[in-house]
Amino acid sequence: MSWLQLRLDTHPDQVEALEALMLASGSVAVTMEDNADQPVLEPAVGETPLWQQTRLTGLYPADTDMDAVLAGFPQALLGGCAARVEILEDKDWEREWIKHYQPMRFGRRLWVCPSWLEPPEPDAVNLLLDPGLAFGTGTHPTTALCLAALDALPLSGARVVDYGCGSGILAVAALKLGAASALGVDNDPQALVATRDNAGRNDIPDAALVTALPGAEPIPAWRGQAGVVIANILAGPLMELSDTLLALARPGATLMLSGLLLSQADAICEHYADRIQLHIAGEKDGWVCLQGRLAEDE
Ligand SMILES: C[S@@+](CC[C@H](N)C(=O)[O-])C[C@H]1O[C@@H](n2cnc3c(N)ncnc32)[C@H](O)[C@@H]1O
């Protein structure tokens, strides 16, 4: 079975009305994205506009008369947008995604391999991953930057905090690269489940990885203990969480921040400047990873 997909590139003011029209005209699902396919950016951290152009995609059964659907939309709404109708072949989307998820190398030693494939370099540090519903497959530039930066750190025996752990990819990578223990924090309980599953998949002993929701009981025990604190979130939370992240770090610790665009780096560096000097440790597709070391007497 195939489907028809109606794509409308429109101004955010019109999104609500157009979504209602799509649903009323037989669309079984409507999704919205920034039509430049950019992530959600936060106005507080840069002048990058949020949702300036929105792409609405409505999914219609294959026998829908799309000319009639479009004719039923008021010109005042449709006039300002680019509309396109496409045939969407029905596929097993989960399988499609899996087909394209292949082993990836980060830095010198680290490979991230889908758990259902054989690692191409059995002697490398191989992290077996099944991201489930959580963010963190290694395919996003920010995750890739953090993984490469982790590979370059002396992690042997370190205690590592992964704040915003998603699939747990960074915490588990740190443990595979020699860290002694890790704390994975996420405000999405599903992410904590994925993190524990991925740790199990990589034979990480239970005691080596603690997972917690923000503010939960195991976190105070980590205050001032971590030799490496990583947070790959977004610029806004990285600012809000600065005290929390720095409180977890011990003197001399490395702080690694990602999830931000090059245009947001100065604002973040400035925000942290009275405690730690951060520099751009890596850049990929417009995203950056910032890194710095706390003073030994911090
Ligand atoms: C961009 S993903 C990063 C996942 C993974 N660490 C990686 O590098 O691929 C950000 C994660 O941070 C979590 N998150 C967002 N805001 C948070 C907050 N204020 N406190 C804790 N976790 C947060 C999200 O649920 C998400 O799993």
Image (spheres, grey):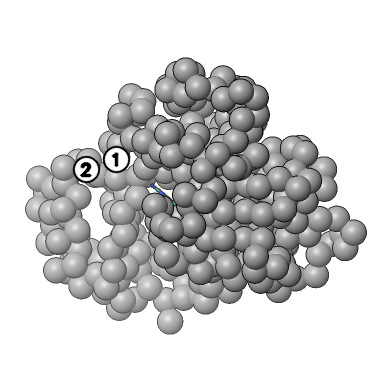
Report if residue 129 is visible in the image: no
Sort mark 1 into few (<14), some (14-19) or many (20+) by Cα contacts within 10 Å.
many
The residue positioned 22% from the left and 41% from the top of the image is 11
Mark nearer the N terminus (2 vs 1)? 2
The residue positioned 27% from the left and 73% from the top of the image is 28
Quadrant where the N terminus lies? Answer: bottom left
Is 170 positioned to the left or the right of 110 in the image?
left
Quadrant where the C terminus lies? Answer: top right
Is 152 positioned to the left or the right of 45 in the image?
right
Is 21 positioned to the left or the right of 117 in the image?
left
x and y percent of residue 108 in the render? 82, 43
Q: Which amino acid does label 2 sit on?
A: Pro
Queried on whether the Cβ of the residue with tag 1 lies below 8 angstroms from ligand 1, the answer reads no
Q: Which mark is residue 12?
A: 2
x and y percent of residue 199 in the render? 65, 66
Judging by the rendered image, the residue that carries numbered circle 1 is 51
Per the image, label 1 sits on a secondary structure element best described as loop
Q: Which mark is residue 269?
A: none
The residue positioned 53% from the left and 72% from the top of the image is 94
In front here: 14 or 38? 38
